[in-house]
Image (tube, helix red, strand yellow):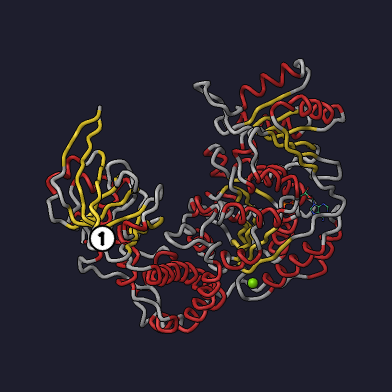
Amino acid sequence: MDIELVKGVGKVTLEYLKKLQIFTINDLIEYYPYRYNIIRIVPIKDATLGDTCTIRGIIDTEPKVTYIKRLNKLSFRVLTDNYLVNVVIFNRAFMKNQLKIGRMINLTGKYDDKRNQFTASDINFEMISGSKIYPVYHLINGLKNKTLTNIIREAINSNITLEDYIPDYLALKYNFLDKYKASLIIHDPNDYNDLKKAKLRTIYEELFIFMFKMNYLKYKYTLDNVGIQRRVDKKLVEEYIGNLPFKLTDDQLNTVKEIYHDLTHKERMNRLILGDVGSGKTCVAEIAMYINYLSGYQSAMMAPTEILARQHYEGISKDFSRYGIRVGLLVGSLKKSEKNKVCEQLINGEIDVLIGTHALISEGVEFNNLGLVITDEQHRFGVNQRSNLQNKGQLCDVLYLSATPIPRTYALTIYGDMDTSLIKTKPSGRKEIITKVFNMKQIKDVLSSMLNEIKNGHQVYVVAPLIEDEDGNSDLNDVIKLKDKFNVAFNNKVNIEILHGKMKNKEKDEVMESFKNGITKVLISTTVIEVGVDVKNSTMMVIFNAERFGLATLHQLRGRVGRNDLQSYCYLLSDKEVPRLKVMEESNDGFYISEKDFELRGEGDLFGTKQSGDMVFKMANIKRDYKILVQCKNDAKIFVEENYVNNFSSYKQFRNLIKEIEFID
Ligand code: ADP
Ligand code: MG
């Protein structure tokens, strides 16, 4: 049924609904109130001065309209609990005709017992005994809460079938309300107990669907899919590790072991490496590619940005050159002829490792025999994309790298379709990065510290929230102006460059080159450098308007420095007192910071939900509803295991979910 057919939805309302992203009846029914108002009828003798309350009474006199300046005022009397009370209400002259003598009404407002006057802010005529709960929705200008409430009620009662995704046996086990009833209650609750039950059921269903997808993917890839069972001489891998210029940390070694196991067993690898910036994930990924290379297969590595892809390309080509491993780069900015050449070499098996942005696997690039796909910064890819990746090579193993250290318990659930390896320990010899918050009045101290680092032969990153303040009326610092200010402060004696997203790739490359070679001393940028850039000689990160950035971003930015044994610093400039910044001063540990981020902001944007979309729940909240999530995880696992083989035959509605994640039409 079309949403236009719901009673009360005219052309105008339809436009409002579209603006609220409500396109279907289901969208409408799942447009949940963000809070509720409760109206409790009190006897007039209990109405205390100053408190808002609701009374119920019978209109006793004809309402009079008077005008005071631009306001209109209705005055009348009501009989309530055998008292006659004078009522005034402003700007309701249009209701005069509804306010007939003898009519029963509810009045919400404040009572002044000395003057025996009730100043009402709201009138309604609903039959309420005791109390009533009203849903309150997020609205846009022009659309009334009441209108939306009515439309939603009509929609629920319009005889549509609401797809119920909670399997019967689970609904029975938990004594859940059915979906129809729960929807009615959520939009028109009678009491809080019912409301709680209705919400619980709705939250459970949302999380169950999410966990179903996870478990389905996991089960499918571990059961059905037989991957490559590589035969690799362990000694060669040990030799490779022995040749590294450093000793692997215990966590790195464990992760390598897990990967080795995955790659040499017939089950396909589907593994996530979670580790802080600089914990040495890339190095582990290289070992995985080496193992894959030894067994005769090609590897692909995808990075979220071109800068990162190029950087990986340079580092990895260098590391692999002594083993004769041929590394290629494929990014959007290559010339057509260059791209063609790479693609040709790829299909001919003349490239062993291909590095690029995620266009690598989506653009119909053909491999000779792809055996391993690695994606960097996994949190930017949602469940659906994860699934797409696994479908790329028939037998392909998949490894994800994420520098977004989310609390382990959450990781286990949210990345429930993958195996996880954790790299917690940092390479030894690393010093804690000294982090300090400054206000703008202390800028001189910051400048002299910067100069100090530069004098010692080190380099400095500066980050600002804006590229350019075009209308010149923002309070925020911008990259362009900062460069001028620094040049003044440093007497044009320091080599300063800028880097931002609006620059051409060639310019960006030149700037990066010059910074990497140590010619540029100060690099001012927006957060384009957020992910992964590795210049070991930089020892200071200065962030302007630090209050504008979330903890995840601040932590990522700080990870640009402290990449060797030099003492490094992170200075956060802000004139606002934000608890986040204190957390940054307190700790260098990404896992601690992510726990704090959860505490401070609920689920936060750590998961990159905005990018992936599939973690956006309409009612559930990962943090608040974590226990339900865990329950759903267990329930969904059993459900999938028991119904996978017979193709979910008694649960038709789940086939649609499967289509959604498998891109089947
Ligand atoms: P990540 O990918 O987790 O950000 P990288 O693998 O890029 O980390 O490592 C960061 C830096 O530390 C690199 O320059 C790398 O060569 C170096 N590194 C990695 N592992 C170790 C180790 N065990 N000991 C010392 N340095 C290491
Ligand atoms: Mg395997």
- Quarter of the picture containing the N terminus is bottom left
The image quadrant of residue 408 is: bottom right
- The kind of residue on which mark 1 rests is Asp
**Measured along the vertical axis of the image, is residue 648 above or below residue 476?**
below
Q: Residue at x 49, y 73 (%)?
A: 216
**Measured along the vertical axis of the image, is residue 292 above or below residue 60?**
below
Respond yes or no on whether mark 1 lies under 8 Å from ligand 1: no
**Measured along the vertical axis of the image, is residue 233 above or below residue 87?**
below
How many numbered marks are there? 1
Q: Position of residue 298 (x, y in %)?
A: 63, 59
Q: Position of residue 591 (x, y in %)?
A: 70, 57
- Residue that sits furthest to the front in the current view: 114
Specify whether 403 is left or right of 563. Answer: left
Q: Residue at x 84, y 63 (%)?
A: 239
Q: Position of residue 133 (x, y in %)?
A: 34, 61
Specify whether 561 is left or right of 380. Answer: right
Report helix, strand or loop for mark 1: loop
Q: Nearer the viewer, residue 639 or 191?
A: 191
Residue assigned mark 1: 81
Q: Residue at x 69, y 28 (%)?
A: 440
Q: Position of residue 119 (x, y in %)?
A: 30, 44
- Quarter of the picture containing the C terminus is bottom left
Camera sees residue 106? yes
Q: Nearer the viewer, residue 561 or 39?
A: 39
